Amino acid sequence: MGRPVLSHFLTLSHSYPRFTPSLVRGHFPVKYMKTTGFVSPSRRPIRFRCFCSVSVSDSEPLVPQSPPTTVKKRIVSGVQPTGSIHLGNYLGAIKNWILLQNSYDTLFFIVDLHAITLPYDAQQLSKATRDTAAIYLACGVDTSKASVFVQSHVRAHVELMWLLSSATPIGWLNRMIQFKEKSRKAGDENVAVALLTYPVLMASDILLYQSDFVPVGEDQKQHLELTRELAERVNFLYGGRKWKKLGGRGGTIFKVPEPLIPPAGARVMSLTDGLSKMSKSAPSDQSRINLLDSKDVIANKIKRCKTDSFIGLEFDNPERPESNNLLSIYQLMSGKTKEEVAQECENMNWGTFKILLTDALIDHLQPIQVHSGYAVVIEQQPVTGGLTLATLQSS
């Protein structure tokens, strides 16, 4: 069984690209590109160009490429297009992307295949995918620096997932905490197999692009650890001499990615419970600040958010999780240091602080809300190729 599976890994490695921003921006000659069509969950065909080694004729010599002076490390990250993008998504992921895109080879995508592990409406998912792309751009993701695409438009994600599934012990998936929690709440009859196996798809998302780092929150570290273990397992089972004998380059098949956990904002907590993570799936909208919430809605949510009866405000007191959470949000919204915020707010009462926090949130989110009032048109570029979120039209 091992040899046929290895041959599939070899075929996949030759047939699909390792996407780079330079590829999407058209730095490869057009004659080395192959056009392929895909269908998204919304069944809308999307065409894009990708660099594929199999499209190069044996009689056609490759143009020598001079090695770059510095090779940037690669980062892959994505957000599900379900529900509204909230402050936790923004501070925990998207806001950090803006800094990362200047120093790394970055690929940011909308993980719509992960969104169908639970019941969904195809039309709503299609709209949410476009809206999420618009928020990416409104938040500052620059498509001249980062590759932006939709997960389902690249079929190699699910093809590699199937191959990785053949090498994944079921016990590894059964120990995933999130699956245990959701299956216990919903019951076995209401939980799809995809909810169990989606960590393998996440591993495929990462390993497909030979990622060096993956920005993750604390709650996603277990899934990334599964990705690392799976990469090491495949390298052990099928790498080295085995791969070389079948025509591969030998050595390791996949890079083993490292977690990249931001020092602040990696885990934004609920407004109604300082011990629970801010989440799209929380039943009460009061628990989160959505990026597109109006000024009045933001003010009302902050006014009603849970606090405590202690005097003054402080960071890092385990008995005051709400104080630590709200101060951390203010720190990130205002751009001040932790020390500056601690000194400014140590003798402040909750009423005064809530006004300060509300103003900081509104001022920070207003530019995002203005720019996200546009609909994204996904176009195929005739020369450069790539899934390019290039054109914004007033919605």
Image: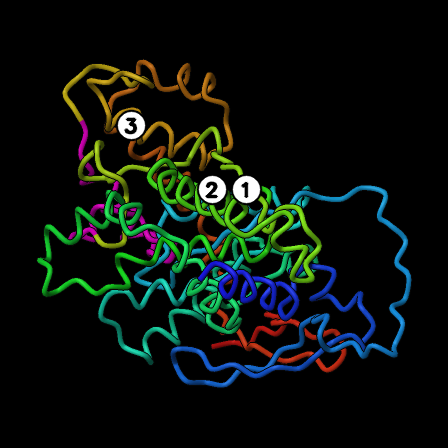
Q: Looking at the picture, how far across and down is residue 52, in whole percent?
A: 69, 71
Q: Quadrant of the N terminus?
A: bottom left
Q: Looking at the picture, tell me which residue is in the foreground, 149 or 315.
A: 149
Q: CA distance from mark 3 to mark 1?
A: 48 Å
Q: Label 3: which residue?
A: 352
Q: Residue at x 37, y 58 (%)?
A: 292
Taking the image as shown, residue 231 lies to the left or right of residue 98, namely left
Q: Are marks 1 and 2 in contact (CB under 8 Å)?
A: yes
Residue 17's place in the image compared with 267, above or below, is below
Measured Cα–Cα span from mark 3 to mark 2: 46 Å
Per the rendered image, the range of residues in magenta is 282-307
Question: Element under label 2?
Answer: helix
The residue positioned 11% from the left and 60% from the top of the image is 188
Residue 232 at x, y = what percent? 50, 42
> Residue, x 27% and y 40% (percent of image)?
277
Q: Identify which residue is drawn at 60% across, 63% down.
A: 10
Circle 1: is it few (<14), some (14-19), or many (20+) Cα within 10 Å? many
Neighbours of disc 2 within 10 Å: few (<14), some (14-19), many (20+): many
Front position among marks 3 and 2: 2
Amino acid on which the number 1 mark rests in the picture: Val
- Residue 389, position as x, y percentages in the image: 59, 70
> Where is mark 2, residue-wise?
228
Coordinates of residue 166 in the picture (x, y in percent): 40, 60
Residue 295, magenta (yes or no) = yes
Is 393 placed above or below 27 here? Answer: below
Q: Residues within 10 Å of mark 3 (few under 14, many from 20)?
A: few
How many callouts does the rendering have? 3
Whichever of labels 1 and 2 marks the residue nearer the N terminus, that label is 2
